[in-house]
Image (cartoon, rainbow, N blue to C red):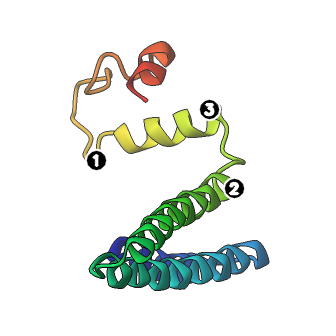
Amino acid sequence: MMFIFFQCILTYRMAHTYWNWWAGHVRCVLTLFGLVILVLSGVFFIQEGFVLQHLAALFEWTFIINVLVYYGTFAFEFGAITTDTFLVLLKASRAPKSYKSGTSTPATPHAHSTSENLAMI
């Protein structure tokens, strides 16, 4: 729950468009719903009743589905990133930070192999 809470904060902090704000609102609602369901699951689980423990199990399943929907919002947000975009970002992150004099080859000899980059993903 702490990870999900911090991710909501980061979503609002990085939001620049209307859709980013919308995703932040959806994530906050899912986070609050997940917190309530998790607390209810714990409360019902410690009870001695047969029905209450089964209700706790239903709340656990609801919590898991809620978290999966939460992670689905990331699929919606990052759905526009293509393989080409990802590979360009990957190559940019592997670029040497400081330039060495006299060398014209990259630090990793396999950095330009697309098939290896995809296999690593």
x and y, in percent, of residue 42 in the image: 33, 79
Residues at marks 1 and 3, CA–CA distance in whole angstroms: 24 Å
Residue at disc 1, secondary structure: loop
Q: Is residue 43 left or right of residue 23?
A: left
Viewer-proximal residue, 52 or 30?
52
When asked about the image quadrant of residue 100, the answer is: top left
Q: Is residue 40 above or below residue 121?
A: below
Q: Residues within 10 Å of mark 3 (few under 14, many from 20)?
A: few
Q: Which mark is nearer the camera, 2 or 3?
A: 2
**Separation (CA) of disc 2 from disc 3:** 16 Å
Q: Which residue is mark 2?
A: 76
- Image location (x, y in percent) of residue 73: 63, 61
The location of residue 88, given as percent across then percent down, is: 55, 37
Q: Label 1 neighbourhood size at 10 Å, few (<14), some (14-19), many (20+)?
A: few
Q: Residues within 10 Å of mark 2 (few under 14, many from 20)?
A: few
Q: Looking at the image, which residue is at 34% across and 85% down?
A: 43
Taking depth in this image into account, of 80 and 88 the one nearest to the observer is 80
When the figure is inspected, residue 32 is found, relative to residue 93, above or below; the finding is below
Q: Secondary structure at mark 2?
A: helix
x, y percentage for residue 64? 48, 60
Q: Earlier in the sequence, mark 2 or mark 1?
A: 2
Tell me, for residue 97, which label it has, or none: 1
- What residue is shown at x 22% (from left), y 33% (from top)? 101
Q: Report the mark closest to the observer, 2 or 1.
A: 2
Residue at x 44%, y 82% (from the top left corner): 35
Nearer the observer, disc 1 or disc 3? 3
Q: Earlier in the sequence, mark 2 or mark 3?
A: 2
Q: Tag 3 or tag 1, which sits nearer the N-term?
A: 3
Secondary element at tag 3: helix
Specify the amino acid type for callout 2: Phe
In this figure, which residue is indicated by the disc labeled 3? 83
